[in-house]
Image (tube, grey):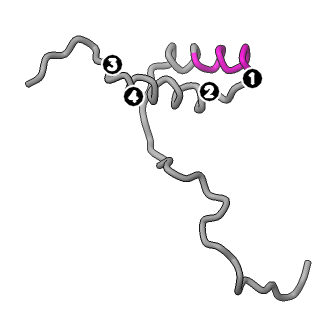
Amino acid sequence: MREEYDFTNAQPGRFSVRGKQQITIRIEKETLAYFKSLAEETSVPYQTLINLYLTDCAKNKRTLGFKDA
């Protein structure tokens, strides 16, 4: 390793995940097991699968049959 590094031309956040926010969420064990098994079948990380599913729901404005309050 070098003793010093020159960061004068560095770009902040260049390799960060854009548009994503880390959160804590509680998910039922069975639900998590489902996504983990699906991840094994598809070789896609389970977090990515959950995000894809939630993104699809949001884009298509899916609801669970709740009525507007």
Is residue 35 rendered to the left or right of residue 2? Answer: left
First-in-chain label (3 vs 1)? 1
Is residue 51 rendered to the left or right of residue 57? Answer: right
Dot label at residue 46: 2
**Local SS, label 1:** loop
> Which residue occupies 72% across, 17% down?
42
Q: Magenta stretch: give its range.
A: 35-42
First-in-chain label (2 vs 3)? 2
C-beta proximity under 8 Å, tags 2 and 4: no
CA–CA distance in space, label 2 to label 4: 20 Å
> Which residue occupies 75% across, 23% down?
43
Q: Position of residue 62 (x, y in %)?
A: 33, 19
Q: Give the residue pinned by disc 1.
A: 43
Q: Residues within 10 Å of mark 2 (few under 14, many from 20)?
A: some
**Local SS, label 4:** helix
Dot label at residue 59: 4
> Which residue occupies 62% across, 27% down?
46
**Local SS, label 3:** loop
Q: Amino acid at mark 4?
A: Lys
Please, which residue is most extreme toward the right here? 1
> Which residue occupies 45% across, 20% down?
28
**Local SS, label 2:** helix
Image quarter of residue 26: top left
Please, which residue is most extreme toward the front here? 60
Q: Position of residue 44 (x, y in %)?
A: 69, 26
Q: Give the residue pinned by disc 3.
A: 62
> In front of the other: label 4 or label 1?
4
CA–CA distance in space, label 3 to label 1: 26 Å
CA–CA distance in space, label 3 to label 4: 8 Å
